[in-house]
Image (cartoon, coloured by chain):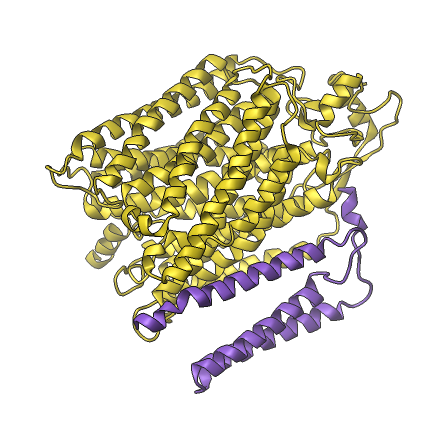
Chain colours: A purple, B yellow
Amino acid sequence: MESNHKFHQEKGFPWKHVVGLFLSLVLTAIAFWLALATNQPPAVIITIIVVLGVGQLLVQLYMFMHFTESDEKAWQVPTIYFALFIALTIVGGSIWIMTFKSLVA
Amino acid sequence: MSGIVNWAVHFFMLDEGPLIWLSDFLIGIASVGIVVALTYFKLWKWLWDNWLTTVDHKKIGIMYLIAAVLMLFRGGTDGLLMRTQLSWPNLHFLNADHYDQIFTTHGTIMILFMAMPALIGFFNIAVPLQIGCRDVAFPYLNAISFWLFFVAAMLFNLSFVVGGSPDGGWTSYPPYVENAFDPGPGENYFLVSLQITGIGTIATGVNFLLTILRMRAPGMTLMRLPMFTWSVLITSIIIVFAFPVLAVCLALLLIDRDFGSHFFTISAGGMPMQYVNLFWIWGHPEVYIVILPAFGIFSEVVSTFSSKKLFGYSAMVVSMIAIAILSFIVWVHHFFTMGAGPGVNSFFGVSTMAIAIPTGVKIFNWLFTMHKGRIEYKSAMLWAVGFIPNFLIGGLTGVMLAVPPADYQYHNSYFLIAHFHYVLIGGTVFGVFAGLYYWWPKMFGVLLNERLGRWHFWLFMIGFNICFFPMYFLGFMGMQRRVYTYPAGYGWGVINLIETFGAVLMGIGFLVFVLNILWSARYGERDVTGDPWNGRTLEWATTSPAPHYNFAIIPQVKGRDAWWLMKQAGESINGPKGIPFKPIHMPNNSGRPIIMCAFFFIAGAGFVFQWWIPAIIGLIGVVVTMALRSFEYNDHHYIPVDEIEETEAAAGRL
């Protein structure tokens, strides 16, 4: 229990969190608006949504997840590499696996 | 009026026949019985103060395990119903609908509501004690995780008697499970309750990852961690990366069903195969989530009952890390027959076979740990030794399934059923039983009876092999999974009858286990030393059950098998005599987790039945209870020195 109190604590008004919340809501809203209310070709919409998704990821990491804070060993670094590996595997793998659809459709 | 009656009859499934009436009756009796007993013995306050509001990892672990054993009973009953139905050609004990619902709930309950909570229960019971700390990193979050699992399990089980169970298999593949083919609340139960328990599981993963990285006792370096704790560390990492994929996958399907979108439909541009892809991106790591902690338990048990340190510690760690990475790049082997092409199938076939290498390393390490050890065949050790041949059979047939051309033959046949029951029962369930016998004294201060333990093991082991080994051959003979009956003349009848006999033996084995629990609670040998097995790791250094604060003074760790080293050196867990105690800082109990999860239940029921008012009320309740936590300033207390001295004196450690 003691070690809980070693974590970094923020002073003053939590601007970072408020801005983060606002940004993540806006990014989500844009994605919905693109999908529901515009008439762009799917490829364009998907590309923009991927970009928005990466933005969302950065907002989460920097605004909420204490990504830049560490008072001991930086456990984040190997974890982030592993996360990148998983993300690339899932996205790349899914695209690769699903290419057969264009052959059979 | 008759409209309402008709609706109610249908809603509560009273038109579905005697099995449902019997279930209604039993559920009613049990619920009324629990309420009456609690009221009669005036136990409500005790229940609330000691259990429902607890944030103590030891009690949360016990609650997880009780729930898991109950769910094992439910899932096992489903299994026996299926075996009864299949025991002879052309039986109509269950109709096709009921059979579909039962195999779906059997699979879902066994994986998500039995295996997961049982193993997470062991995380809770053993990890903080093994690394020498006083609770997990986030005790309050830990309570939320448990109650999320619990309400999800209740919601899922409710489907049996209210509205109808899901019937799309535990994998719930679209397009069948889309509204067009499978209307009604059944599949929503599956999607919503898995979503709720999944949130709890992610929280558990974060919690234990942080606990192990940040809260180890001084001197407990990563390479000195007990092997079970290592397995939990790796499992937590897999949980954190795999479960979000399940959450997304289930959410998309739920949006399809509740709000009419087309992610996985066959019309309007949906792609059902993408669901299969996403499901198994989670699904394959999931099988490692339920097997790695069992490996950890076997490592502890084998080493303790061979009176030897674990052979090949670093090889064990490296192979678990390798398994964790490989587990994320093999998922296509669950759907080779989808036809993604030779390139894709070869890649995933080879990566799947590669997993056999680290797993084989682990098997050899256990064998070499036993080699020339002084082996004591206590019940826990029996399960560990029984696991090795069973898991080997399951693992090797897994390699057979990994060959894509051959898989086109085995796919969805009873060969597959036999394979995954050999790894999931032979691995996970054997691990859970080994862990129960091993840590039971630490949980309750009582040893389980060895004689009944042996009966339990042998009945279960023999029954298991009689039930599942013939399934490999049945698969070759062409029997497919998920068929509710089959014609005579295929030669399947006798084999199925033998299997059913084996399943009954497993059921009797389980009853012996229940008898063992009841017998031991009353007559069992009390564990007065806290170290009944001459253990090696720190959980055996403290009393059974451990005091509320675990360790009066945080121990100094000098090597692997910390407690063994202390015993060799004649040291006390509290260090040299005369170190003064200091007040111990502990988290307060809180009723909010259970209340928050009750709101989750209400919201969940809303999403199941598409009742939007309860859904909104539930979600608002969740947000409000979550926000209220931020304004709670009085969330901890100190245990005074007098109380610590009293407890330690009673334990003979002063």
Q: Image point 45% across, 46% down: which residue?
A: B353
Q: Quadrant of residue B577?
A: top right
Q: Position of residue B38 (x, y in %)?
A: 49, 31
**With respect to residue B114, does B389 lie above or below?**
above
Residue B585: x percent and y percent?
Answer: 78, 39
Quadrant where the C terminus of chain A sits is bottom left
- In the displayed structure, does residue B116 sit left or right of residue B345? right
Q: What x and y, as percent, mark residue B117?
A: 50, 40
Left or right of B267? Residue B595 is right
Q: Residue furthest bottom?
A: A39
What residue do we see at 59% from left, 46% from top?
B236
In the foreground, B392 or B254: B392
Tell me which residue sits at (23%, 53%) in the image.
B5
Tell whether B11 sits left or right of B57: left
- Quarter of the image where one finds residue B69: top left
Work out which residue is located at the far left of the displayed protein and give it: B489
Tell me residue B543's x, y (percent): 68, 22
Q: Is residue B151 visible?
A: no
Q: Quadrant of the N terminus of chain A?
A: top right
Residue B571 appears in the rendering: yes
Q: How many marks?
A: 0
Of residues B179 and B241, the one nearer the viewer is B241
Q: Nearer the viewer, residue B338 or B274?
A: B338
Relative to A41, say whether B560 is above or below: above
